[in-house]
Image: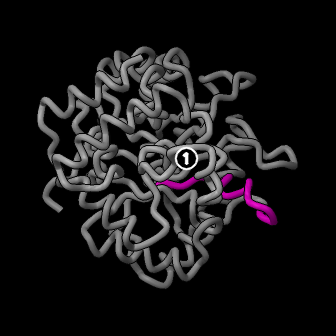
Amino acid sequence: MENRKKLGSSDLWISPLAFGGNVFGWTLDESASFKILDSFLDAGFNFIDTADVYSMWAPGNKGGESETVIGKWLKKSGKRKDVILATKLGIDMGEGKKGLSANYMKQAVEASLKRLGTDYIDLYQSHVDDPETPVEETMSAFNELVKGGKVRYIGASNLSAERIKASNDFARTGHLAPYVCLQPLYNLYDRQKFETEYSQLVLEESLGVIPYYSLASGFLSGKYRSVNDLDKSKRGQGVQKYLDDRGFGILTAMDVVAREQNVPLSQIAIAWILQKPLVTAPIASATSEHQLSDLLHATKLTLTNEQMARLDTASDL
């Protein structure tokens, strides 16, 4: 794929869209997951993002399901070298399995490597902050994993800009590997935190940016227009917070742009993020070949300056 982008200061070249692995072992069973992963790679894309905790929230699951599915697919397909594989740690998985302490990180990475069926992780990320553990301990532990060849690069998600800056300052002082990327919540509706807290940090630290919830849990696909639509999928209840005047205003603007471009709303949402200069690659999930096709086509869509302005105005805080 010609339009791959360098992830921050790393030497990882990633496709302009990352596949979000939260659906594996939850809304997609193993067979369907294999098919959609095959299609994603066959289309020339290479970046898969998951986490150890996926999909612990689903009834009967205990966490690790997504990594396990990906691991089985990698073994079956033999495509490990074709994939940039990202996972995360830190969220409470029960039985004391949480945080960013050195001892726990050693356990967590081994568990993820085993589930993924690989001996290295391309991008290992702090999923949430651990305020009880000093950044010095966390960064030193990450670097032990890097030196040991278990991890190539490290990133951060849901840490404050202040904690990321402190982490990278320590890394520089000790000649350690720094965080090379940020995985923030960022989409047409959820703009404030990234644009006010993180944007300057991204520039100063030369961080890659791989936003999650690019479609706002499906709200920006346009299929949720009222509370009556929330039962349309298992993710519906996560959409209710977007059903307000601002949300409806965003959908109205997206409807106009979608008609002009003659594409679905989901493509407009992804294209808007991709045309933001600080973004490297948004993360999005699909549960069908049709949805995946929409997402992949969005990476080739160019919105006009007027269309970007319309969307910016509608989603302004």
- The answer to if 81 sits in the magenta stretch is no
Closest to the observer: 15 or 295?
295
Closest to the observer: 2 or 60?
60
Kindly report the secondary structure that dominates the magenta region of the rendered protein. loop
Q: Residue at x 56, y 27 (%)?
A: 159
> Can you identify the residue that label 1 sits on?
145
State the count of labels: 1
Q: Give the magenta-colored segment's residue range.
A: 49-61
Q: What type is the residue that disc 1 sits on?
A: Leu
Closest to the observer: 5 or 35?
35
Q: Residue at x 76, y 43 (%)?
A: 92
Q: Is residue 274 left or right of residue 88?
A: left
- The answer to if 52 sits in the magenta stretch is yes
- The percent coordinates of residue 209 (x first, y second) are 36, 36
Closest to the observer: 1 or 9?
1
The answer to whether residue 174 shows anywhere in this view is no
Considering every residue shown, the one lying at the far right of the view is 95
The quarter of the displayed image where residue 18 is located: bottom left
Q: Is residue 142 left or right of residue 134?
A: left
- The percent coordinates of residue 166 (x first, y second) are 51, 16
Point out the image quarter for the C terminus: top left
Q: In this rendering, is residue 303 above or below 72?
A: above
| Colour theme | one colour
Q: Residue at x 31, y 61 (%)?
A: 294
Q: Residue at x 62, y 69 (%)?
A: 68
- The percent coordinates of residue 282 (x first, y second) are 37, 45
